[in-house]
Image: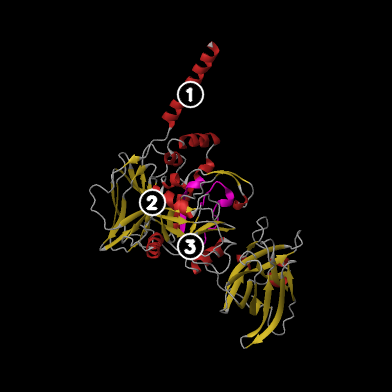
């Protein structure tokens, strides 16, 4: 009996110590705030809270659309933007209200350079994939708005690596990335905290993503780029059997959608209230997001948040996301209902221009072009360094200098006519065992050419390809800058122009540049220097003196298995 009493006493003592440890190490509860900004005139705009970058059972999430919408409603959200993984060929669901929450269907597209979350795009006519520059180009052509997802993820394969392309937005914060650099001990403590204060425990894992903010600031110096915080919500914690998210596994629905929705939100400023018409309201919401009329708030720190950021010059006024026309000195103002002890920080071109304690900030800037955004920082809150409570989108004073990468026709004179009459260039067809292709000469008023007909094999995409191969020699290619031709196809599509040189693999080493084609004939020029290796282990650029073939390739990167069609080439020549 004495031994039992001793064991009981020890157990009770340890339990009490553990309980005290949990109580005293729990993250502080969210600070309740009064809505509105004291001392500021009321605004006519409506601000709606919502969530962006959410996955469902249609890809690697554990909740159905209805279940996610119900969780969003319980958390007080007004909209949810779904970004299930895909290639754009699934027709997006039309906007709809579910449980009183506006649900908008988007897609997260995998590229060789990271993931691109896309909203406001219809059904793609072919699978979107391959290099990021091609996906960004296709999304823009199809009217979508694309965001570089989890750009600085500790997981290398998730990082966004292509910064020269004209992307529309960037995730300055991605909640799913934030836990990946924590120690197992810190994650275990977070899991215990989650049992008592779910949103606050998730917020405690957030830190200031300095690299992402620096990248965003650098991009906005050259073009308008909208900054968003993505939840990357899956409600999926456990072990997966295979790389395919549909292959099954053992999962807990943690962290829950509702907990994530209570952790951080996008706050979108609307010029007019919603009508209750899902299609109209979704178009309104997406237009405001694209315009950058949106800020991020970490609700698990404090809420409900109120925030305004404006700039004035002469008779001109701009709010976050806008370009301000300069007509003299620029006056910037920011106001918030932040908790006591908070500071407002005005960033100018990525550097602190002014930092003040209290709910109001005013600053007069020169009339020179600059980019300004605001952070609201709350003391004794998560992260090392601490994550800002509110992050605004920029005001672009004088407008950013828009810079686009353009690839014009390569210079030089024709060194080898590939298709012209009298050309002695040899060409042939290559394809995998399941696919078929033919090539036939054609002549019409536009000039002589070739029709390359292809039929990819069916089944899952596992190596199906067809290629029209022009045999050449290295000395001819090394004396050229690229290849040009006039081309069309029977449908909107992508194919790749490749050069090949002998290598250890029987297929040799190849570099490629993808091009877009449709039934309208167009002039195409591809610079050899703009090609990239098909395999990452290869050198950045080909040794042109060793190239023995130029290929036009149709494969399952952008074409579904079982697809048959044709590509017409005219006036093909190396330049």
Using a 10 Å C-alpha cutoff, classify the residue at mark 2 as few (fewer than 14 neighbours), some (14 to 19) or many (20 or more): many
Say few, some or many: other residues with alpha carbon within 10 Å of mark 1 (under 14 / 14 to 19 / 20 or more). Answer: few
Residue hosting label 2: 77
Q: Which residue is mark 1?
A: 15
Residue 269 part of the magenta-drawn span = no
Count how many numbered circles sit on residues in the image.
3
Q: Are marks 1 and 2 in contact (CB under 8 Å)?
A: no
User: Disc 3 designates what residue?
Assistant: 93
> Judging from the image, what secondary structure is the residue with disc 2 in?
loop
Estimate the x, y position of residue 27 in percent, counting from the top left: 42, 35
Q: In 3D space, how far apart are the residues under numbered discs 1 and 3 (Cα atoms)?
A: 51 Å
Magenta stretch: give its range: 150-177
Few, some or many C-alpha atoms within 10 Å of disc 3 (few <14, some 14-19, many ≥20)?
A: few
Q: Quadrant of the C terminus?
A: bottom right
Q: Position of residue 366 (x, y in %)?
A: 31, 57
Q: Secondary structure at mark 1?
A: helix
């Amino acid at each position: 009996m004495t031994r039992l009493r001793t064991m009981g006493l020890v157990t009770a003592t340890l339990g009490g110590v553990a309980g005290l440890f949990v109580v005293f190490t729990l993250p502080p509860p969210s600070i309740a705030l009064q809505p509105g900004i004291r001392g500021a005139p009321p605004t006519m705009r409506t601000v709606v809270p919502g969530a962006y970058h959410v996955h469902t059972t249609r890809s690697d999430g554990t909740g159905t659309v209805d279940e996610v919408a119900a969780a969003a409603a319980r958390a007080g959200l007004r909209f949810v933007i779904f970004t299930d993984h895909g290639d754009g060929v699934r027709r997006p669901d039309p906007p709809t209200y579910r449980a009183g929450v506006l649900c908008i269907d988007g897609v997260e597209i995998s590229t060789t350079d990271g993931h691109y979350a896309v909203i406001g795009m219809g059904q793609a006519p072919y699978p979107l994939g391959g290099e990021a520059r091609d996906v960004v180009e296709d999304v823009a052509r199809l009217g979508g708005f694309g965001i570089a997802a989890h750009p600085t993820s500790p997981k290398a394969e998730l990082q966004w690596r292509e910064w020269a392309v004209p992307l529309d937005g960037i995730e300055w914060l991605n909640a799913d990335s934030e836990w990946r650099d924590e120690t197992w001990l810190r994650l275990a403590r977070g899991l215990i905290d989650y049992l008592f204060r779910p949103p606050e425990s998730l917020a405690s894992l957030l830190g200031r993503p300095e690299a992402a903010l620096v990248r965003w600031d650098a991009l906005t110096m050259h073009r308008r780029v909208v900054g968003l915080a993505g939840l990357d919500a899956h409600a999926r914690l456990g072990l997966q059997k295979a790389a395919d998210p549909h292959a099954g596994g053992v999962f807990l629905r943690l962290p829950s959608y509702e907990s994530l929705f209570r952790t951080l939100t996008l706050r979108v400023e609307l010029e007019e209230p919603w009508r209750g018409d899902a299609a109209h309201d979704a178009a309104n919401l997406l237009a405001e997001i694209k315009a950058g009329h949106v800020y991020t708030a970490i609700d698990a720190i404090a809420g409900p948040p109120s925030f305004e950021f404006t700039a004035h010059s002469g008779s001109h006024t701009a709010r976050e996301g806008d370009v301000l026309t300069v007509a003299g000195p620029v006056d910037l103002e920011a106001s918030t209902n932040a908790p006591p002890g908070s500071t407002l920080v005005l960033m100018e071109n990525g550097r602190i221009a002014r930092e003040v304690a209290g709910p109001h900030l005013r600053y007069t800037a020169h009339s020179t072009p600059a980019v300004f955004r605001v952070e609201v920082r709350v003391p004794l809150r998560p992260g090392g360094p601490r994550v800002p409570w509110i992050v605004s989108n920029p005001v672009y004073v004088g407008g950013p200098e828009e810079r686009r990468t353009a690839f014009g026709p390569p210079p030089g004179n024709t060194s080898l006519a590939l298709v012209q009459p009298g050309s002695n260039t040899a060409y042939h067809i290559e394809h995998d065992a399941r696919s078929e292709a033919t090539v036939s000469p054609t002549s019409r008023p536009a000039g002589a050419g070739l029709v390359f007909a292809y039929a990819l094999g069916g089944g899952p995409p596992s190596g199906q390809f067809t290629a029209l191969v022009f045999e050449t020699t290295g000395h001819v290619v090394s004396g050229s800058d690229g290849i040009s031709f006039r081309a069309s196809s029977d449908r909107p599509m992508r194919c790749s122009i490749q050069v090949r040189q002998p290598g250890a693999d029987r297929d040799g080493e190849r570099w490629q540049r993808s091009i877009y084609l449709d039934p309208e004939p167009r002039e195409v020029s591809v610079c050899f220097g703009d090609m990239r290796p098909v395999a990452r282990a290869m050198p950045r650029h080909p040794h042109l003196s060793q190239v023995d073939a130029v290929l036009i390739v149709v494969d399952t990167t952008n074409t579904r298995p079982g697809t048959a069609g044709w590509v017409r080439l005219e006036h093909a020549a190396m330049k």
